[in-house]
Amino acid sequence: MNASNPYAPPAATVSDVGADITVEVAGRGSRLLAAFIDGLLSLVVAVPILMAVGANWMMWTDPSAILAAVMGVAGFISLVLWLALIVVTIYLVAKNSQTIGKKLVGIKVARSDGSRATLGRIFWLRNVVNVIPGMIPLIGGFYPLADHLWIFGEKRQCLHDKIADTIVIRA
């Protein structure tokens, strides 16, 4: 008897299950350029504070009065710029898994299988967890070097990519 079960769940064919996602891993040069752009943006945001501190060192009058006057305005400007940079970065990472530098260069972070990387994975595993080894006395200073030297492997993954199970791909 070939009667169908009226209580069985409906069957559906899903064509993309098990399909391989094809991605192009980003080149080392594009990753370096994106990191350079992000670092440059961070430096620009810090310029008001750096200028205020530099101006204080160059003055021969009352340093505490100059520092208080200049740092108040410079500190406020830098704080506003930092907050703007953080908000834009969080938005871009949450939306596209990209920082500003990665967006300009045309690359993004993805899971190692090519699927989308979440903001939480990028923030916690690629950034926060990656800072912890650098805090270890004596050997912590070598961690950033070791982290970045892993990029010369076959998969072009830094150590922080391996920790977060991510890769950087062409967007």
Image (cartoon, helix red, strand yellow):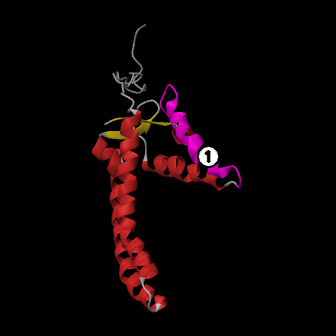
Pointer 1 residue: 143
Percent x, y for residue 94?
Answer: 37, 51
Numbered range of the magenta stretch:
137-158
Question: Where on the picture, by quarter, is residue 108?
Answer: top left
**How many C-alpha atoms fall within 10 Å of the one at disc 1: few (<14), some, or many (≥20)?**
some
Q: Is residue 142 a member of the stretch shown in magenta?
A: yes
x, y percent for residue 145: 57, 43
Question: Which residue is depicted at the point 36% across and 38% down?
Answer: 30
Quarter of the image with the N terminus in it = top left
Front residue of this view, candidates 67 and 96: 67
Q: Position of residue 128 (x, y in %)?
A: 55, 53
What is the residue that sits farthest to the front in this orientation?
60
Q: Taking 121 as reference, is 79 left or right?
A: left
Q: Residue at x 44, y 91 (%)?
A: 61
Q: Nearer the viewer, residue 146 or 106?
A: 146
Pick whichever, 94 or 80, lies toward us.
Answer: 80
The answer to whether residue 83 is seen in the rendering is no
Tell me the quarter of the image containing the C terminus. top left
Quadrant in which residue 9 is drawn: top left
**The quarter of the displayed image where residue 83 is located:** bottom left
Vertical arrangement, residue 112 with respect to residue 132, above or below: above
Q: Does residue 1 show up magenta in the picture?
A: no
Q: Position of residue 97 (x, y in %)?
A: 37, 45
Q: Secondary structure at mark 1?
A: helix
Tag 1: amino acid: Tyr
